Amino acid sequence: MKSAVYFTDRQARSDFNMLDKIEIVFNKLGLKKAIKKNSKVMIKTHFGAWGNTNYLRPAYVRKVVDLVKALGGNPYVVETCGLGYGSGGAYGGRTTAPEYLSMAALNGFTEGSLGAPILMADGYWGNDVHRVKIKGEHVKHVDVAAAGLDADVIIVLTHAKGHGLSGLGGTIKNLGIGLVGKSGKAAMHFDGKVTIDPEKCLGPDCSLCLKVCPVRCITMEEKAVIDLNACIVCGHCTGVCLRDAKAKAISTKWRTPKDQAVRFVENALGVIELIGRDRFYYLNLAIDISDKCDCWNVGAPLLVHDIGIFGSRDPLALDQATLDAINESKPNLESEAKDVHEGDCIFAIAHNQKDPKTGELLDFAKIQLEHAKKMGLGSRDYDLVTLTKKPPKR
Ligand code: SF4
Ligand code: SF4
């Protein structure tokens, strides 16, 4: 069955700009009816890393906040903590709530600029989660960020761009990585285990890992000891343990990119199954499209021109329509997409990751969307409805 995907292009005039355009997609999605007086409305976006200059501008989030408020709803804007510990550099990282929120302010996201409270949906450490069992092929439970559980309406406002592990960093990625706690991110990236080599551990004089373990499952004897039954594999201890990879006493093993691409799809399934599909409304903004996710500390060169705004109630149809539009665009010959030919996936060419066994180019966007269909996230078939009318004056 085909799902409706609403679209408005990137053309803008002073009397019909991109903020007006977000409003026509917002209205078409049915949000005017869904948001009632005092409805709790969670808006999920991504604040970008420091140094990234392609992330979604706060003005788009502000517009959505204002639309929600005009309907009598109570909006709040959320993000979740990043994986690992202490990788933030001079302006901090995305490890804990205060660290990420202070970095978000540097990128222009504050309660003042957005007109709504901002919080980390998964709490101070990224472990305020609710665990849900799912019937995934690879993932059997998902640690969903707790903040969305009592929201009446959830608006997932996504910057569509590339992502090194999922091909397309769209709505499904914003759900499957962006709305799970740190352990959910780790379950996707790591093989589920932390190992410690006592020979390399510096013992009580160091003890750094004890301080950063959110579940306090490391104790110090002669050397550090981890209670693996209690460990949530958040990656904090590996982040602080002797930065040099060879010297590290604590380590985790990364999954292959192919293994990761299917797991976050299953995480996304857990998120929407726990919270309830009917509460979700999705928007993809296909602008400032580079090959890199906004969690990179760089605004990489853009692969194609800006395309516009897509909206749907079906996350898979939305990502498929967005990806198709990106792949149908002319590549920027100054970018990583310069070698793209008709029928290629621009992100696969730009990422240029090969299967180590066969040497074949890996198309993670295709792997992601095929698996999303298999897992029942939605439909890959869609009707694209182009919207051109200005919103009515309020
Ligand atoms: S951080 Fe590493 S070296 Fe330091 S106590 Fe923990 S395991 Fe040992
Ligand atoms: S021991 Fe486990 S829970 Fe504790 S910091 Fe390390 S990875 Fe996280």
Image (tube, helix red, strand yellow):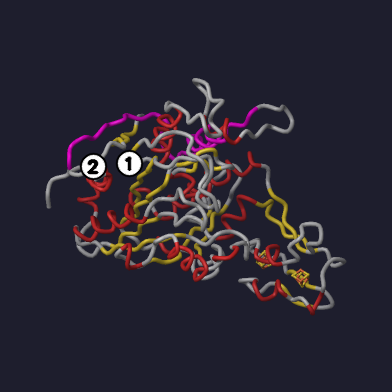
Picture coordinates of residue 41 (x, y %)? Answer: 31, 59
Element at badge 2? helix
Q: Going by the image, does 121 lie left or right of 42?
A: right
Q: Going by the image, does 70 lie left or right of 199?
A: left
Residue at position x 38%, y 51% from top?
156
User: Seen from this angle, which residue lies furthest top?
Assistant: 342
Residue at position x 84%, y 77% from top?
222
What is the quadrant of residue 59 in the picture?
bottom left
Q: Please count the marks in the image.
A: 2
**Which numbered marker is on residue 283?**
none
User: Seen from this angle, which residue lies furthest right?
Assistant: 199
Which span of residues is magenta-colored? Answer: 361-390
Location of the N terminus by quadrant is top left
34 relative to 308, above or below = below
Q: Quadrant of ligand 2?
A: bottom right
What is the quadrant of residue 307 in the picture?
top left
Picture coordinates of residue 27 (x, y %)? Answer: 22, 46
Name the amino acid type tagged 1: Gly
**Which numbered marker is on residue 28?**
2
Name the amino acid type tagged 2: Lys
The residue that label 1 is drawn on is 311
| Circles 2 and 1: CB atoms closer than 8 Å | yes
131 relative to 134, above or below = below
* Residue 132 magenta-highlighted: no
Q: Nearer the viewer, residue 235 or 85?
A: 85
Picture coordinates of residue 265 (x, y %)? Answer: 52, 44
Q: Nearer the viewer, residue 257 or 293?
A: 293
Picture coordinates of residue 322 (x, y %)? Answer: 40, 35
Note whether ligand 2 is within 8 Å of mark 2: no
Report, in whole angstroms, how far the alpha carbon at label 2 lies from the one at label 1.
Answer: 8 Å
Residue at position x 39%, y 29% from top?
381
Return the disc, 2 or 1, that comes first in the chain's sequence: 2
